[in-house]
Amino acid sequence: MSLPTIAALHPDRPDELAAGAAALRDGRLADAVAAYDRALERLSADGQPEQRGAALLARGLAYQLLGDTSRATADVLSALNVWALVRPDWASSAMSDLAEALSAAGNSAADSYWQAALRLAERSGDVALQAAVAGEWGRHAARAGDAVTAVALLEKAAELGRRAGDDAIVAKALVNLARVELDAGRGGHAMRNIGEALARDQRGELRAATAGLLIDVAAGAFHAGDTAHAELCLEQALSLSGNDRQILERTLAALGGLARTRNDYAAAARYGEELLDSARRGGDLTVAAEALHDLGRVAMAAGLQDDAAQRLTESVVIARSLGLDSLAASGSRALAEVAIQRGALLRALGYAEQAVILSIGQDDLEACAATLLLVSAEAGRAGLEDVARPANDGAAEIYRLLERDDLARLLSGGSPLPAEAAEVRTDRLHAGLEAARSVVNPSGPADRL
């Protein structure tokens, strides 16, 4: 989750100064020098000392980053001379601009510029400016992973913002502070700051950022076993999501998962349908495939086999078209379970084998082995040895691949099949795979697995 910007109070500047600052932030140093050259050509040598000083200092920084020390020194000295009588608030704003550019580029000199900007803001007596500079410095410190500095600066920004009566600055500082505290495992502190931020965010500018924080708080509460608090946070996040589709979909997915854990299939299906509708309206096939997968699982748990098969099949088709092999493998395993429930054990074997082909990691393969063993057990009970045996042998092969030789030996039994039986097993296996292909990808060629 990105941290919201706390903008410093920058006075109006010519376009060339803005272009130079943007070039510095992007690391386009030659473009920055050219922009500041143009700015200095247009600015009067006798007037506009604030803007001339800013252009000279920024061009000196660009030269320094380019390794041209002599030009850098000359520009910095010129800037200091021009700024001798400049208002501290203007100088602070310009320095914070340069500090932000350096922070974005990961330059270690950034803190020196932030410190200078904050001291100039303090000299100006402008409390709101001090709050803005401290908040912006704290935001960049958080991004750089310096949590101690970030907390100190963001707390300072919030306190100064309260003194200045600027709710927007306070709210942004508190949201950024809550992110740092949440990352440090201090969920209680984070929630208190989120609450105050929401109360002060009168224009609603921080709704999406706050909702993202609440989703993360909910995740922490869920893992700690406090599902009631998790649900409360998620419902609040849902109310704040507004038009932010990413936040809305993250919240719906989390609420659906929470509903599944308490076996509330009606609620899980409702959230899943809302998520699917949002993904389709946004044209996001990945989220659509994930939503369909979850809806299929919910339908399975509710005993709605036809609905489960339809949802899972559509999910697998989309996942395979996008190269989402792990998702397609999970969907194929679920389709195998549906086929078992329907008594279609040969088809179940086909789906289970397809899942093995699509699996890309150890967790997937272990799940595939479990599915194959389930197929084998059900086929064994039904007296279908030609299905039970290849499913059992497939699980044993996976365990050998995973170096679980104890399980592989247990399943293999140490006695190879006769050649004739092996041929029958192969024929049956291919028939099962073809059956799976005909449902999962009915219009595609058989060799696209």
Image (tube, grey):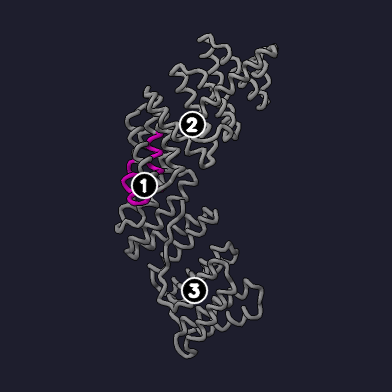
Of mark 2 and mark 3, the one earlier in the sequence is 3
Query: How far across and down, in percent of the image, does residue 13 sit?
Result: 43, 77
Callout 2 touching callout 3 (CB < 8 Å):
no
Instruction: Specify the amino acid type for callout 1.
Output: Arg
Residue 21 sits inside the magenta stretch: no
Residue at horizontal 56 percent and vertical 84 percent from the top = 78
Q: Secondary structure at mark 1?
A: helix
Q: Main secondary structure of the magenta part?
A: helix
Horizontal arrangement in the rendering, residue 88 relative to residue 77 (left or right):
left
- Using the image, tell me which numbered label, if any, was put on residue 19: 3
Q: Which residues are magenta?
A: 235-257
- Using the image, tell me which numbered label, if any, was put on residue 121: none
Relative depth, front residue between 444 and 147:
444
Q: How far apart, in angstroms, are the residues tagged by discs 2 and 1?
A: 24 Å
Circle 2 residue:
440
Camera-side mark, 1 or 3: 1
Circle 1 residue:
281
Q: How far apart, in angstroms, are the residues tagged by discs 1 and 3?
A: 37 Å
Q: Is residue 394 shown to the viewer in this render?
A: yes
